[in-house]
Amino acid sequence: MAKFRAAVVQDGTSRQGTSTTLEKAEALIAQCGSRGANVAVFPEAFIGGYPKGADFHIYLGARTAAGRDDFLAYYNESIVVPGPETEHLGMAAKGAALFLVIGVIERDAGTLYCSVLYFGPNGDLLGKHRKLMPTALERLCWGFGDGSTMPVVETPWGNIGAVICWENYMPLLRAAMYAQHVAIYCMPTADDRDTWLSTARHIAMEGRCFVLSACQYLKRRDFPETMNNKLSDNGDEVLMRGGSVIIDPLGNVLAGPHYEGETILIAELDTDQIIRGKIDFDVIGHYARNDIFKLTVDRTPRAATEFVSGT
């Protein structure tokens, strides 16, 4: 038996930008550490922001100067990985002595990616995952990840991995995570609907893993002043209501879902529950039917350009 404490942070990006949000993240990480958390999970796009309500003024066959300015403002709040911001996050994880999983908007040249970063309790950046499939209008502002950034990270309580928002509706991606023996399945998201709870419970049952789902709580007043918002001009309007939750491998809800504001959910998790659950279902073991089904995962980085030297 190995027990550990997990924290799921439900809070929002600061409208003042990345530097202020980074300070908020550092304070929240410290709070998680002070409450005895060994693992802390933050929402999708916490650093850099999830621009809910933005449309970048794009129409089929047309772009606008105002939309380009909105994208510039969004780009300017993104971060380079690794970079100064990841150093700060690493120091915060080290100070709190925990494993940190946090959503960021990463820039690589002229493209933005919705990414998740992993940090160890020694402060090291252990890996990242770029969202493979942005959903709907997300494709206007984010690029597509490839198979080279689908890691799991070893912890004393089993492997930890992250699948972002509606990537969790991709059965083959879930299968790839299960095949890496993920024990702590993180779901940073911007989906605050009632249906998300059933998704999280299904994944916990399917993977016989702990599910830690983190969603932002964000009001209109917290949306960046530099960007147009099509949803509301009322500062009290809730753009994302949260719904963060912690679930065990048998689908039992241990904490949350919480919809009333900012919070940090804490739960003690017992890894024996993973094995208890696998007596009757192991999705990559005795329930897999490897004689019939097979999944091939291509981890090759997909660079746009390859430079070769002549002989």
Image (cartoon, grey):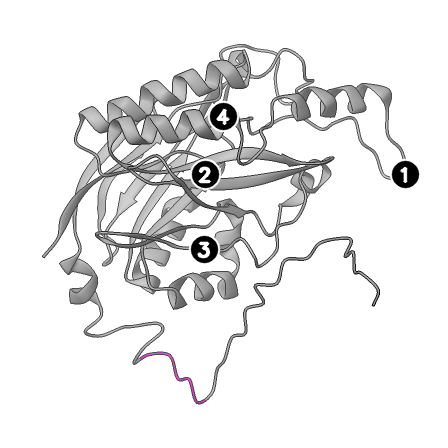
- Residue type at mark 4: give it: Glu
- Of the image marks 1 and 4, the number of the one nearer the N terminus: 1
User: Magenta region, mostly helix, strand or loop?
Assistant: loop
- Residue type at mark 2: give it: Arg
| Circles 1 and 4: CB atoms closer than 8 Å | no
Residue 268, located in which quarter of the rendered image? Answer: top left
Residue 221 appears at what percent x and percent y? 53, 11
- Of the image marks 3 and 4, the number of the one nearer the N terminus: 4
- Residue type at mark 1: give it: Gly
Q: Which residue is mark 2?
A: 193
Marking on residue 85: 4
Please indicate whether residue 273 sits to the left or right of residue 229 in the image.
Answer: left
Q: State how far apart marks 3 and 2 are (Cα).
A: 28 Å
| Circles 2 and 1: CB atoms closer than 8 Å | no
Q: Give whichever of 164, 195 is nearer the camera.
A: 164
Q: State how far apart marks 3 and 1 are (Cα).
A: 37 Å
- Of the image marks 3 and 1, the number of the one nearer the N terminus: 1
- Of the image marks 2 and 1, the number of the one nearer the N terminus: 1
Q: State how far apart marks 2 and 1 are (Cα).
A: 32 Å
Query: Where 139 falls versus 78 (above or below)?
Result: below
Q: Which residue is mark 1?
A: 61
Q: Secondary structure at mark 4?
A: helix
- Of the image marks 3 and 2, the number of the one nearer the N terminus: 3
Give the extent of the magenta segment: 287-291
Residue 24 appears at what percent x and percent y? 40, 17
| Circles 4 and 2: CB atoms closer than 8 Å | no
Q: Secondary structure at mark 2?
A: loop
Query: Where 266 falls versus 168 (above or below)?
Result: above
Front label number (4 vs 2):
4
Marking on residue 151: 3
